[in-house]
Amino acid sequence: MIDKKPTSRRRLRKNDLAVLVPIVVLSLAGVLSYFLLDECVFLKLCQQPSSWYSSKWLDALRQLGKTLVPIWLLLLWFYVTGRLRPTLIGLLALLLVAPTVNSLKIMVRRPRPRDVIEAQLEGQEINGLLHSWSFPSGDTASVFAVATAVVPFVGWYLIPVFFTLAAGVGFLRAAVLAHYPSDVCAGAAVGIFCGWLALQITRRWLSLESPRFNWCRGAAVYGVILVPLLIGLFDGLDQLLIFLKTYGLLIVGIYVVVKAGSWSKRLRGRDACNH
């Protein structure tokens, strides 16, 4: 396991190459999208607007790219499983995403597609250093960073699920004209790099052991309660209701299934003892 045994240099080189491949592929895809795809997708979405992505579950998928939701899921995972290491690595990956994405946004200063439309309608120019810029996609970077950071700690069958959800977030960001396809590809590459970098930092320089006292695990409860309140405060009541109706119901459903499984095992164990 990655959190119990030190990784050899040979294994590390293989992992580095494995991470390098999607980063290079996504970077090349971003370059090609910039020259061949961005304008076509932009014009297509402008000419044929759609509202298929307005369901509450797709809204919940979009929320997954917001920093608060991955933080909430990481804290909840830590509280349920008691595994501190993947939680801290995931949080570190998000911490690395913020300066990386914001620096690139300020340097490139590419307007968002929907801002271009609004400016054209109002006859204005888009300028200003503090504007919400498009390149790269921060939401896509955040969700790919967390996925990359935590996949070494989960079963192989969950890896495609995590990255499919991450790709879904990026797809929706382009569908709602918040980003161009090249922005999404660049965001995914940045996220994978930040997730990998978080793993390297903790593997080489930090010792993240499981907490010895229950107070550390119990403190995650305060974060689990605080994050929805922050969502309601900063994003509005509508986003809070979407969060509760989707992620809240999903967590309750998972809890019920797990409890039902444990009860079933207990009943089978009692029946075996009686016989």
Image: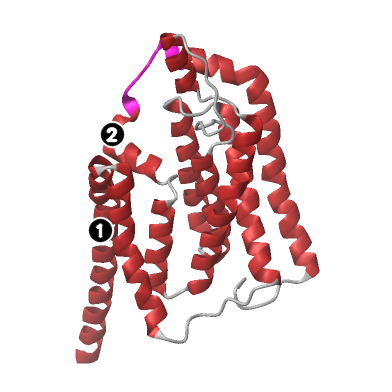
Q: Position of residue 123 (x, y in %)?
A: 46, 9
Q: Decide whether residue 114 is among the magenta residues.
A: no
Left or right of 168 on screen, residue 206: right
Which residue corresponds to mark 1?
A: 253
**Crowding at mark 1 (Cα within 10 Å: few <14, some 14-19, many 20+):** few
Compared with 179, 57 (above or below) is: below
Image quadrant assignment for residue 216: bottom left
Q: Is residue 237 left or right of residue 31?
A: left
Q: Quadrant of the N terminus?
A: bottom right
Q: Secondary structure at mark 1?
A: helix
Q: Choose top left, top right, bottom left or bottom right for residue 220.
A: bottom left
Instruction: Quickly name the residue at label 2.
Output: 55
Identity of the amino acid at label 2?
Ser
Q: Bounds of the magenta span?
A: 45-52
Q: Is residue 59 above or below residue 259?
A: above
Which is closer to the viewer, label 1 or label 2? 2
Mark seen at residue 172: none
Please provide percent x and percent y for residue 17.
75, 53
SS at mark 2 in the image? loop
| 255 relative to 127 in the view: left or right | left
Q: Are marks 1 and 2 in contact (CB under 8 Å)?
A: no
Task: Identify the residue at image location x=38%, y=82%.
Answer: 215
Q: Amino acid at mark 1?
A: Gly
- Pointer 2 local density, CA inside 10 Å: few below 14, some 14–19, many at least 20: few
The C terminus lies in quadrant:
bottom left
Q: Position of residue 209 (x, y in %)?
A: 55, 80
